[in-house]
Amino acid sequence: MIRKLNGMTIERAAEALRKLEPGARCALISPSGPAGELMIAAGERLLRSWGLEPVRAPHLSEVHPRANYLAGTDEHRAADLTWAWTDPDVDAIFCVRGGYGAIRVIDHLDFDALAAARPKPMFGSSDITVLHDYWQQRLGVPTWFAPMIATPDLQDSSDNIEALRRAALGDGPCELASDSFTRTLLPGSARGELTGGNLSLLAMSTGSDPAMQGRADGRIVFLEDVHESPYRIDALMQLLLRSGYFDGAVGVALGMWVDCGPGYEIRALMHELLEPLGVPVVWGMRLGHGPRVSSFPIGRGVVARLSADEHPRLEFDPFPR
């Protein structure tokens, strides 16, 4: 069953999905790993070319004093995120890169301040899955799953740049890309809110939020990952399945599995593990990492339609902008 949205939820969803107008001030934050100055500067030039005004978070260029895989201390990264979300002079948030570290931020967030703020578009993917999940479950607003502006996934792909531009500026339809290798694994059709993200981060979240059972109830789940071996993907899926995360899910869309071993092995594994759910499953959507992937919204108020048939596809119901 699709959750019915009340007027306030629809209004908040519309704020979080609104298109950015010329001159919109866009906060650049790094809730996870550090990004290099050259990559950040290239991202700023890209946003300016779209008529947007990038604004660096106070701690954007920091590196954790102990762990160089983190962009500053947990407290500083959380403070940057809280500032970007609550400052009324900031119109949107762009996470500059992923890596690792968002899971360490969520316990430092001021929930009351975040919940009281006017929603705004937030863009990110990969490790940012943790924040997408928090915004969906705790704040009840959608976010944008998209390649990040200080990463090669975006800067080296003209297709990804154009997809992010359309998502940010509302210039054209929002598309979920498929490819010649997109296949139906388990047939059927489904309609529901879209949730999910990076598999390893969703599995990691089971430790930060024990209330995972039924998290996907009534929803279509999308999954993707990068740099994980088949046995690791098996283990991560076992963790989600045994936690009850998939209980009540109405469909599954499987995205890209970059550097995760032979695709046929991952596809066979997913068929084996997901078949008992009895829901439609599509393989090979261009969601996640790599070139020519989609930029799309997920979370509350974002309803998708999954068609697992001869021409498998994932499409959106119209959503407020």
Image: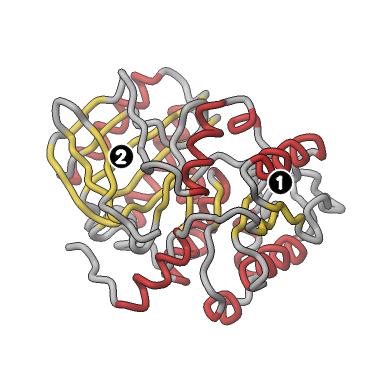
Q: Is residue 69 left or right of residue 231?
A: right
Residue 186: x and y, percent? 17, 34
Residue 72 position (above or below residue 98):
below
When the figure is inspected, residue 285 is found, relative to residue 144, above or below; the finding is above
Please name the residue that numbered disc 1 is placed on. 33
Residue 273: % across, % down? 27, 37
Q: Amino acid at mark 1?
A: Gly
Tag of residue 253: 2
Q: CA distance from mark 1 to mark 2?
A: 27 Å
Nearest the viewer among 37 and 205 is 37
Q: Which corner quadrant holds the C terminus?
A: bottom left
| Crowdedness near tag 2: few (<14), some (14–19) or many (≥20) residues, C-alpha within 10 Å | many
Which residue is found at the position 14% from the left and 43% from the top?
Answer: 189
Badge 2 amino acid: Ala
Please say if the residues under marks 1 and 2 sit with CB atoms less than 8 Å apart: no
The N terminus - image quarter: bottom left
| Residue shown at the point (34%, 36%) measured from the top left | 254
Q: Choose top left, top right, bottom left or bottom right for residue 25.
A: bottom right
Circle 2: element type: strand
State the scheme by which the image is colored.
secondary structure
Instruction: State the residue lying farthest toward the right.
Output: 65
Query: Which quarter of the picture shows residue 147?
Result: top right
Give the tally of numbered discs.
Answer: 2
Q: Can see residue 244?
A: no
Q: Earlier in the sequence, mark 1 or mark 2?
A: 1
The image shows residue 244, relative to residue 274, as above or below, that is below
Q: Where is residue 232? Give x, y as percent.
A: 47, 34
